[in-house]
Image: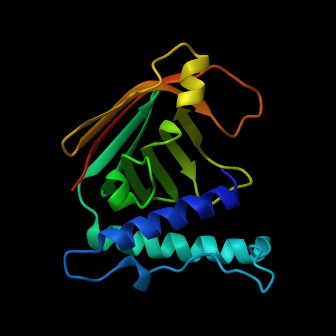
Amino acid sequence: MTIRRLLIVLSALVAMATACGSDNGDSATDAATTPTESSTGATADADQDAVDVDELIEGLEETQAAQGGGGATLVVGDEQWTFDRVLCAFGPDEIGQEGAELVVSSLQDGLQLYVSIDSFGHSVSLDDIEDFENPSVSLGADQFNAELAGLPTEFIVVDGTSVTAETQFFDQSDDVAAGGTAGTLTATCP
């Protein structure tokens, strides 16, 4: 995942958390900032992006600690990652994006789990957000890869506050289109 893509995802999550607010009336805007703009309106250089990423991650972690609950487990092949808390939003009003149905996100141990159903389709990703150059993990499942693999493109199932997915996950850090690995996601929203 590139720094710019991460900034977009984190900014969207901060906006989502702000829209949802916490039970005590606080919002994520107290805990996070958005990417800075230069006087020309362009996003700041890579050094500034790194600072913004750190600030967004810190803000999202604080929001997750305050508002998060539930949990998630992702199993791909013989590897498993467990997340103790998740942030969830349902529908375009909570998410702040037209056509969006679901967002589940969690940051833990330098990794980000991100699940979404939106106008681009179904997607699940797990990314190392501490080392973009040499990520320890960068796995993704999306509608495009599912279609190429001949798998169902709508692989995320939402049942109340439970979210499950079963599909093929692909190594996104590898430029070579290698085959996918079977994986499952189970998550419970607070």
* Residue at 59% over, 28% down: 144
In the displayed structure, 51 sits above or below 88; it is below
Q: Is residue 8 above or below residue 90?
A: below
Q: Residue at x 61, y 18 (%)?
A: 148
| Residue drawn at point x = 28 percent, y = 64 percent | 68
Task: State the image coordinates of residue 34 (x, y, percent, origin top left).
Answer: 57, 77
Question: Which one is in front, 82 or 152?
Answer: 152
Q: Is residue 138 visible?
A: yes
Q: Is residue 143 left or right of residue 167?
A: right
Quadrant in the rendering for residue 36 = bottom right
> Which residue: 59% across, 73% down?
54
As rendered, which of 7 and 107 lies closer to the eye? 7
Outermost residue to the front: 98
Q: Is residue 86 visible?
A: no
Q: Nearer the viewer, residue 166 or 29?
A: 29
* The quadrant where residue 165 appears: top left
| Residue 81, percent from left and from top | 41, 43
Q: Quadrant of the C terminus?
A: bottom left
